[in-house]
Image: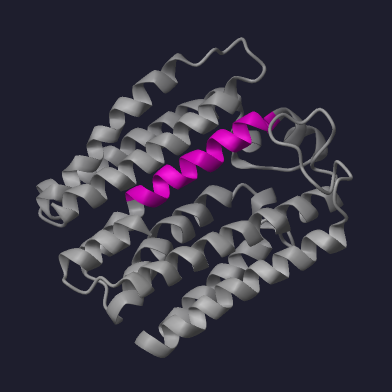
Amino acid sequence: MIVAAAAAHRSGVFDWLSFSLTLLGAVAIQVAANFANDASDAARGADPEDRLGPPRMVASGRLSAPNVWRACVLAVAVAAACGVVMALRVGPVILLIGLASILAMLSYVGGPLPYGYRGLGEVFVLAFFGVVATAGSRLAYDGQCPAFVWWLGIPIGLLAAGILMANNLRDLPTDKRVGKRTLAVLIGEPSAVRLFFATLWVALALTLLLVIIGVEPPPVAAGAAAGIFIVPLHQFDRTDPRRYVSLLGGTVRVHLAFGLLVALGLLL
């Protein structure tokens, strides 16, 4: 959302209403996804008591599944309301993006063929948290999206996929035991760790390459400085059972730093 806002400012079309609508809509979709995942994973037995990480509401008995689904519907309604307002301003394509996002959210670990159980979670995160979110948010300002914003969605999506990979590395033992076939489960921990770090560095290398070949404006290269937050991640304690909890938080910081640096470059 921040990168799209900076891109809109660079084109002279930024306005606070569009920014507020895209931010609120995106957060609402994220909240809805967390609620849906909580209830769906609990129904499939994917959240055992020995799972690391924050407690899950349904599996722990703190909230009932029907109440969590009601909260999910409410969050979706908030996102839909934002989408309708944006569509009235710039055109119906925003509604199509919103509908696709909601369907992807509900199908992650829910429905008859949850793609999160088939090693495809990272692919969908790359698409929806990267390209769709970045380009869609830019479209919300004036119905236009310059090519460089579409391309920017790829490194943003790769870093978001890195967050999911760190999450799935943390949950690998329990996911494997309950039959949740994430990418980390399918390729094994050593390969998943190598792929995780490769994903982060490739995102930054791709950013520089896009600048070098003229696809991205030069200020976007500032995002590569987020690499200083990746280097310490290589030193995570491999003997600590909770090692991937800290790795997950560190990956979030990389993603945030990249977005802020790119946005700052575009603004300046």
Q: Quadrant of the N terminus?
A: bottom left
- Asked whether 8 falls inside the magenta stretch, the response is no
Q: Is residue 106 left or right of residue 145?
A: right
The overriding secondary structure of the stretch rendered in magenta is: helix
Pinpoint residue 35: horizontal percent, then vertical percent. 71, 56
Q: Is residue 86 visible?
A: yes
158 inside magenta stretch: yes
Q: Report whether residue 44 is seen.
A: no
Identified at 42% across, 90% down, the residue is: 88
Residue 181 lies left or right of residue 150; in this view the side is right
Residue 197 vs residue 80: left or right? left
Specify start and end residues of the magenta stretch as a single range.
155-172
Q: Residue at x 69, y 70 (%)?
A: 74
Task: Single out the residue that lies furthest toward the front.
Answer: 16
Residue 242 percent coordinates (x, y) = 65, 20
Side of 102 where 148 appears, left or right? left
Nearest the viewer among 218 and 158 is: 218
Q: Position of residue 193 (x, y in %)?
A: 51, 26
Q: Position of residue 30 (x, y in %)?
A: 57, 58
* Picture quadrant where residue 9 is located: bottom left
- Work out whether 120 lies above or below 111: above
In this rendering, the answer to whether 203 lies above or below 53 is: below
Q: Nearer the viewer, residue 31 or 162?
A: 31
Residue at screen point 59% across, 20% down: 243
In this rendering, the answer to whether 258 lies above or below 234 is: below
Q: Quadrant of residue 66?
A: bottom right
Q: Nearer the viewer, residue 147 or 5?
A: 5
Residue occupying image coordinates x 40% and y 41%: 255
